Image (spheres, rainbow, N blue to C red):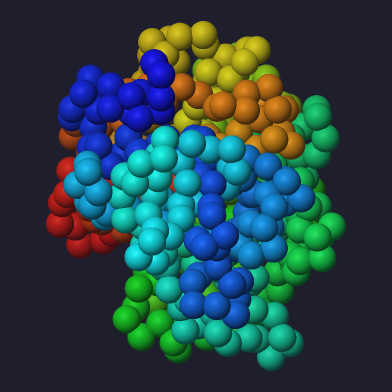
Amino acid sequence: MGSRTALVEDLMERFPHVPREAVFKEDLLRGGVAFDPSALSDNEGGEVKPKSYFIFSFDHGTLPELGEAALRRPPEEIILTGGPYDLRRTVVSVRVNPSSPYRVAAGEDGVLGLYLDGRRISDVGVPPMPEYYRHTLANGKSVMEVAPTIQWGYLIYLTVFRVCQYFGAKEECQYCDINHNWRQHKAAGRPYTGVKDVEEVLEALEIIDRYDTAKASTAYTLTGGAITKTVAGRDEADFYGHYAKAIEERFPGRWIGKVVAQALPKDDVRRFKDYGVQIYHPNFEVWDRRLFELYCPGKERYVGRDEWHKRILDSADVFGARNVIPNFVAGVEMAEPFGFTTVDEAIASTTEGLRFFMSHGITPRFTTWCPEPTTPLGKANPQGAPLEYHIRLLEAYRATMDDFGLSSPPGYGPPGPGRAVFSVSSFMDSLPAEESATV
């Protein structure tokens, strides 16, 4: 197939039940997008909300390789609308790739557009600088550094521990660059707090609450690296949980509280619940047994795949199945040299995992794999997984949900094309629009 445009249009024709917006979104997430200087932000001093690097780099190059985009950050997210495909409003997390066939640039009229193979395919909206980003903590730290918001302001992302205790080739997840991202920001002289002080988090949230008068921020996520020993004298459940306890005591009911942590024993999970967490994300990463053992060596060594899955099911007894939402990294199933060699095999494996969890009322979600170049899988697979895999996964995901009578999970905003705000995969864009009391 001669061009990326031809590939995208072929998939839209072959899979008409997948929203066309999701086809473009998945391609941008898996392969990244280039930015003309006219589309870059002026960092925290400008009118556009800049990319915060809230946990991983989500880039196809290191900071020194990004050129001007390393000095003037691109926007946190972009919105696609209109164009020849009449795209409905689609929020896409920014993953920078200077060599991408997609490029964001200002046209002759000064209006930003997304270009593919040299042709303008949509208008591009960028997030305005929120008022709360214009204020600093008493110690001078920025709100963006302590409590950045993503998903068009819906989610406050609190990476309170910015490194992982699974360390080195024999323990780190093979697709994850959390430790490298920490190192590159420190090397560049950027502020990148390793362990966030709970009082700083509360102060940043107070600023957000004060200036977010529209109440656009609806949820917060507490997350960070795995803790195999302790941090500041606390084990994993107590470390992440004590932030939730402080937040819920200071701001009772203001936000939906979520925590991304390892699959922990039930007594530890109960501590999360007691601290006020409402949604638990014990990510299962990849379904296939062999690939889990290869790609998640630390998790296999410390917990093991079977025990990991048992703990996920056990956590439903604490939170209720609907509020247990494990993530997987969509695309690593096809990473060379160990992954599946055909899309059929990869989809069959992942669907088996979806059916396993959904048969217990647990609805997983996924992040579209970005092959970051400092990770083993990123180095070996700079192109990521085929776009067809990602499109067929959306089809399989929705069909499996329908089979088990499940609806979109809580804490992700509204579902449906033109409505979804979840930005790091298209799973919410591909689900039917629905009215829900808790989104």
Residue at 65 percent across and 70 percent down: it is: 145
Taking depth in this image into account, of 29 and 375 the one nearest to the observer is 29
Give the quarter of the figure containing the C terminus. bottom left
Spot occupied by residue 74 in the image (x, y as percentages of width and height): 56, 60
Give the vertical position of 213 relative to 238 (above or below).
Answer: below
Give x and y (percent) for residue 144.
Answer: 59, 72
Please report the residue visible at 64 percent of the width from the left and 57 percent of the height from the top: 69
**Quadrant, the N terminus:** top left
Splitting the image into 4 quarters, where does residue 19 fall? top left
Question: In which quadrant of the rendered view does residue 352 lie?
Answer: top left
Question: In terms of depth relative to the viewer, which is nearer, 352 or 236?
Answer: 352
Above or below for 341 versus 265: above
Q: Is residue 367 visible?
A: no
Query: How many numbered discs sit on the rendered protein?
Result: 0
Residue at 51 percent across and 8 percent down: it is 341
The residue drawn where x is 53% and y is 18% is 334
The residue at the far front in this view is 108
- Residue 422 is left or right of residue 383, and the answer is left
Query: In the picture provided, is 423 more to the left or to the right than 340?
Result: left
Q: Closest to the observer: 294 or 325? A: 294
In the rendered image, the vertical position of residue 201 relative to residue 404, given as above or below: below
Look at the image and tell me whether residue 56 can be seen.
yes
Question: In the image, 219: left or right of 396?
Answer: right
**Residue 153: where, in percent of width, then height?**
41, 68
Residue 202, image x and y in percent? 59, 80
Quarter of the image for residue 190 reads bottom right
